[in-house]
Amino acid sequence: MCKDEKTIKDLIIGRRVGFYKVRGEIGCGTFSRVKLAFHALTKDKVALKVLDKTRLDSQAQRLLSKEISSMECLQHPNVVCLYEVMEKPSRLYLVLEYAGGGDLHNRLSTQGKLSENACKITFAQILSAIKYMHNINVIHRDLKAENVLFTSSGCIKVADFGFSTQVSNRNDALDTFCGSPPYAAPELFRDECYLGASVDVWAMGVLLFFMVTGTMPFRAETMGKLRRCVIECEYTLPPWVPGPCQRLIRGILKEAPADRYAVDQMLGICQSA
Ligand code: ATP
């Protein structure tokens, strides 16, 4: 449970924020609480991300402003839409498209691996979102199963642009370690400058492995061991994994960024499978 959840809950649930009536809790992040809310007139459900401005240090403020500016550029059926941003003296509210079907991590943890068909449909939708983002020079940098949400009708929505960045061109090098270590590419662990699109592509390989096997490709008891496994690209793909998934995973999880499949190659394999 979030440390000051009770306070925030007492203050917000049942209240109205702009046109939105807050009805319940969805979850919480490091600096945010996410509430379920309804538009008072249309009755549409939204996810209201509430941030206590007094708790945001300068780093968090910088990330938040990047999150907002990335999301403001994005309009795609497989990306959570930012409808509006509201500000009060001590709080900031991001009004987000609601994805009420849970997240992929939870689904894989409770149900185990996805069927081949479900993998194909899910992976193709995430790829479509990534292709769109990269085409407009937005790099997500925190792709992981927790950030892949489902709507109640099963459509994929990529969420959480808290580590995203906008580059002026796709070949711009980045240098900040972002994201979750089990999804991080070798160049991130080597502390090298990296191409944003390549680290998103690597994370797609980790995600596909997770979806198709129900386990993570790189696991270790310590960060040092995880780092070594990733840098040496040491993973074992079970032989029963279907051929197209094998091809995709082996084509994506390559140590050298330049050797990894491009998003269009992945889409081609998905479509022909
Ligand atoms: P952190 O901020 O530390 O990265 P986080 O990503 O979990 O953590 P949030 O993005 O604030 O933090 O999300 C908190 C919770 O709300 C998560 O469980 C997430 O799945 C859920 N959530 C976020 N956005 C939506 C949305 N648009 N629809 C439904 N649930 C959402």
Image: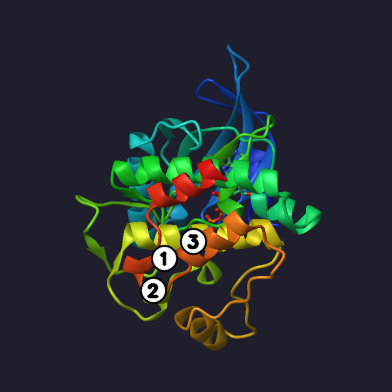
Q: Quadrant of the N terminus?
A: bottom right
In the displayed structure, 3 sits above or below 148; it is below
Circle 3 — which element?
helix
Q: Nearer the viewer, residue 49 or 182?
A: 182
Q: Amino acid at mark 3?
A: Ala
The single residue placed furthest to the top in the displayed view is 41
Q: Amino acid at mark 1?
A: Cys
Q: Nearer the viewer, residue 34 or 244?
A: 244
Q: Nearer the viewer, residue 9 or 182?
A: 182
Q: Which mark is residue 66?
A: none
| 3 and 1 marks in contact (CB < 8 Å) | no
Circle 2 — which element?
helix
Looking at the image, residue 262 sits to the left or right of residue 55; the answer is left
What residue is at 61 percent from the left and 71 percent from the top? 217
The answer to which image quadrant residue 189 occupies is bottom left
| 2 and 3 marks in contact (CB < 8 Å) | no
Looking at the image, residue 185 sits to the left or right of residue 111; the answer is left
Circle 1 — which element?
loop
| 2 and 1 marks in contact (CB < 8 Å) | yes
Q: Nearer the viewer, mark 3 or mark 1?
A: 3
User: x and y percent of residue 107 in the render?
Assistant: 73, 50
Instruction: Give the residue number, with chain letter if any, for mark 2.
Output: 188
Is residue 213 visible to the viewer in this orientation of the structure? yes
N-terminal of the two: label 2 or label 3?
A: 2
The answer to which image quadrant residue 202 occupies is bottom left
Instruction: Give the residue number, with chain letter if any, for mark 3.
Output: 203
N-terminal of the two: label 3 or label 1?
A: 1
User: x and y percent of residue 65 in the render?
Assistant: 34, 47
Q: CA distance from mark 3 to mark 1?
A: 12 Å
Q: Which mark is residue 178?
A: 1
